[in-house]
Amino acid sequence: MSQAFAFTPKTRTQGSSADADLAMKTCPNKDGDSDSDASTDACSGASLTCSQVFTSSSLPQMDSEESVAAMESLSSPGTAKKIINSDGFPIDLKEYKLVAVDPWKQETLSRSQLEDLKANISLCRDAIVSFTAVAGAAGLGGHTGGPFDIVPEMCLYDAFVNACPQHFVPTFFDEAGHRVAAQYLFSVLHGHMPAAKLLQYRVAHSGLPGHPERGSTPGVEFSSGRLGHLWPHVNGVCRANSDKVVCMFGSDGSQMEGNDAEAARAAAASRFNVKLFIDDNDVTIAGRPSQYLKGYDISQTLRGHGIEVAEVCGEDIDRLFSAMRQAVISQGPFAVVIKRNMCPGVQGIEGTTKAHDVIDTASAIRYLEAKGHHEAVALLSSVKNTKDPHGAYLGAGALGACRSQFGEAVVRALGGLSSAEERRAKVVVVDSDLEGSCGLKKIRETYPEVFIKSGIMERANLSLCAGFSCGDEDGRQGVFATFAAFQEMLISEITMARLNRSNVLCHFSHSGCDEMADNQCHFGVNNFFADCSLEHEDGPKMQLFFPADVHQLDKVVDRVFWEKGLRFIYTSRSKTPELLDEEGKPYFGEDYSFELGRDDILHGADEQCVGYVISYGDALYRSLDAVRRLRKQGLNVGLVNKCHANVVDEEVLRKVGSSSFVLCVESQNSKTGLGIRLGTWLLERGLHPKFDRCGTHREGCGGIWEHAYHQGFDSDSIVAKVRTLAGAAEKSQNVSERDHFAGA
């Protein structure tokens, strides 16, 4: 059911030689603005000191043909010229030139090497714009700016490995996994897969997910994990390959994470031979670090850890080569901090936060037309948006984004305070560079006095909220938000906040796996890890909530905002429909009141059904559709919404436990989610209906809506599992009755 794209080539066109230099001429000055003068001028400021650190030499230089010959003469089989299959891709990647540069023998690039590298950089950047834009036009999302940026350093490192592979671990480790488009492109250039495969970037079941996953894609040799988590792993690779150079591509966003600080100290202490090539474009999702994180300086930070650092303009290829060469031939850890505007040379998005995400179709068409890639434009113009084939869901109304609605609900709660001074005294809201994704932007815009625009430092930000609200004499509240996947690294901070009896309302968006083209490292499927308090302890209890739609989210926030202790609200990345009763009215509308610890029975409240489905969050509307269909088919099935997910509603549990079967449907990990708790609760009370679970239980498939089908909590799968349970329950009942009569 996934969507793939195909292209039938006609006549391929290449841009002019002037086009090859288009993206080479911009670099940020110290204010972060674009400078259209020559890159040597852009790099002459005091902050970029490569001209002072590196000197040129008149050593003999190889031209392009000599470079290739030198590479092919090496004995390693990995140096053989790769066959690039460019069929079916609108840009001819066979034009990628094989460049080999031995950094131990060459101090400068020859003119032909420089020209070939510039041509390669232009070609690669054009390809990245083309296939990432295709994914964007299909509704699959993605990232263009990051992979576009790091192409020069990847092409140079590729040339180093080509010349002397025996000295390098050839893997292009990247701690910013969202830049995976560059990994996929080089997989093609290295002959691991055909270029046409790039048109399936982020498509479900294509093996090209939104972050690199080892074993999923030919030529991709590592899993990046979450942002800023790879460097410690790369240190281990260094330890295992102590006679080789190991590189890692970094970013200014990744370097904010605490993992990198620990990895830096370890690398410096052990003198690991790791080389960091860090793209410092001063752009993250929600803004510019130079503006929202004053004092943050990658170079100074790394030097403070004991690592040698060079700064360079990334669009000056000669200087970039000199800096990277110096890093490679030096013993021990070395970082090259690479300054540039994000998406240099791309009109309309260069240097903006828009460049972090996938390029919009209009900007991509404008760029590709200017470069002469008319067939790439034709392909992009033909792309259709992917969508769930299910059609309308029974009981589903208008779609709404719970993750955005969270901000609206908090604004309403803050509006109940009398003044800006009172709000500032009682509430702090801390963002981790995801204000738009988690709904916090509305809070910042409405009540800036409570808002701290912080960096990608989730541990510190959560603890800030906890420290602000501990003690509780004044009823202070902290509000924290990030992606649910990142909750897994916060359990220690959650425990400390619990022990200090802090009051923090935590919003974890992107829960579950729905619409998660970024795939497994961004799955938010272990939410119940947050419920880590002891069963019997003093202080407020941990409370986990997963509202079903925007109406219920409003009611939950209204009810729990001023509660004491730690409260966790989970929302999905995807929009969910408002849930409607059989009269077409919202279940959680104006007349609904959310009560702590109380489950909502959507079907079967006034009757004893043959069995029940228990669900919540983004799985609930699918469960409602399945239950409505089953009831129409004559199977009297009930439906329970368990929004307050970690608290037992004894009355409802007895009701469902007295039926013939119970099915738990969720988007959480089937090993850690509600299902295993629900089964335990039933057994503890002597209730033994036939029982089963639907949930996330296998590796992700990429794509958007496909995840629910892949994991088996789509409507059709729920119907099938209910029928299987009902049949098993009926068979068991028949056996029991037969045994009863036989005994009589």
Image (tube, helix red, strand yellow):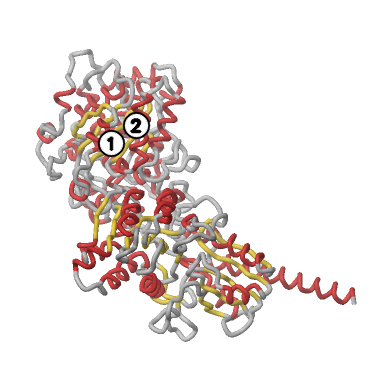
Identified at 41% across, 37% down, the residue is: 187
Identified at 81% across, 75% down, the residue is: 737
Give the image location of residue 576, x and y in percent.
Answer: 42, 69
Q: Are marks 1 and 2 in contact (CB under 8 Å)?
A: no
Amino acid carrying label 2: it is Arg
Towards the viewer: 362 or 449: 449
Based on the displayed image, in which of its 4 quarters is residue 149 positioned?
top left
Based on the displayed image, in which of its 4 quarters is residue 89 positioned?
top left
Identified at 26% across, 32% down, the residue is: 304
Amino acid carrying label 1: it is Ile
Question: On residue 278, which mark appears?
Answer: 1
Q: Is residue 744 visible?
A: yes
Q: Crowdedness of circle 2 by 10 Å Cα count: few (<14), some, many (20+)?
A: some
Give the image location of residue 684, x and y in percent.
Answer: 65, 65
Question: On residue 265, which mark appears?
Answer: 2
Give the image location of residue 518, x and y in percent.
Answer: 41, 51
Quadrant where the C terminus is found in the figure? bottom right
Towards the viewer: 387 or 331: 331
* For residue 5, side relative to residue 362 (left or right): right
Give the image location of residue 26, x and y in percent.
Answer: 15, 40
Q: Can residue 518 be seen in this view?
A: no
